[in-house]
Image (cartoon, helix red, strand yellow):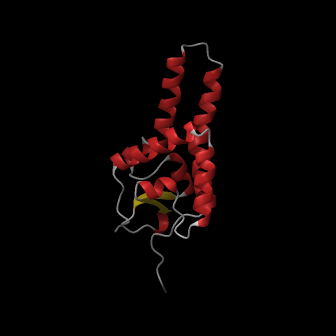
Amino acid sequence: MKEIRNLPVQFNERIHAFSIDYGVVFLSILITIFLYIHPAFKAVIILSVWYMMNIFPSFIKRGITLGKLNSKTIIVDESNNEVTLFTIHKRSFFILIVGFLTVGLYFIVSFFLLTKRNDKRSIHDLLFKTKVVYKDSYISG
């Protein structure tokens, strides 16, 4: 029987992880809109929630977010090795900044690209030389 290794994650699992990670962030934005505090504190709250959802879990186990943990996927580099914290930071900040600067258009283009590519890699995966694979099929480099 042939063993399947480092199988690229399909569209549904990527959307599942994204919706958990950014759904909480968007919820925090909605909540802070109604708080009577200084806008700088609102920004700190929102960025803290984003950081806790998208980067902090990788300090515990490299390549995961809470959404990826729930969808049983993991971020690895092109050589199927564990991704570095620095790469996770760069990749996550790029997604955040470009996603909000383009008012969400980046997410649409990115998901469209991922559906068309055989390796299921998105724009940020190509730029930062990463890929998302199923955690159960992941075997290091």
Residue placed most toward the observer, 9 or 90: 90
Q: Residue at 39% across / 69% down in the picture? A: 139
Residue 59 in picture, x, y percent from top left: 37, 44
* Horizontal side of residue 139 vs 9, given as left or right: left
The answer to whether 81 is drawn above or below residue 88 in the figure is below
Q: Residue at 58% across / 41% down in the picture? A: 22
Examine the image and state in which quarter residue 101 appears. top right
Residue placed most toward the observer, 7 or 124: 124
Counting every numbered tag in the picture gives 0
Q: Residue at 43% across / 44% down in the picture? A: 57
Residue 126 in picture, x, y percent from top left: 45, 58
Which residue lies most toward the bottom here?
1
Residue placed most toward the observer, 33 or 58: 33
Q: Quadrant of the C terminus?
A: bottom left
* Horizontal side of residue 90 vs 134, given as left or right: left
* Horizontal side of residue 11 vs 5, given as left or right: right
Examine the image and state in which quarter residue 29 appears. top right
Residue 20 in picture, x, y percent from top left: 59, 45
Examine the image and state in which quarter residue 36 appears. top right
Residue placed most toward the observer, 56 or 15: 15
Which residue lies most toward the front here?
102
Q: Residue at 37% across / 49% down in the picture? A: 87
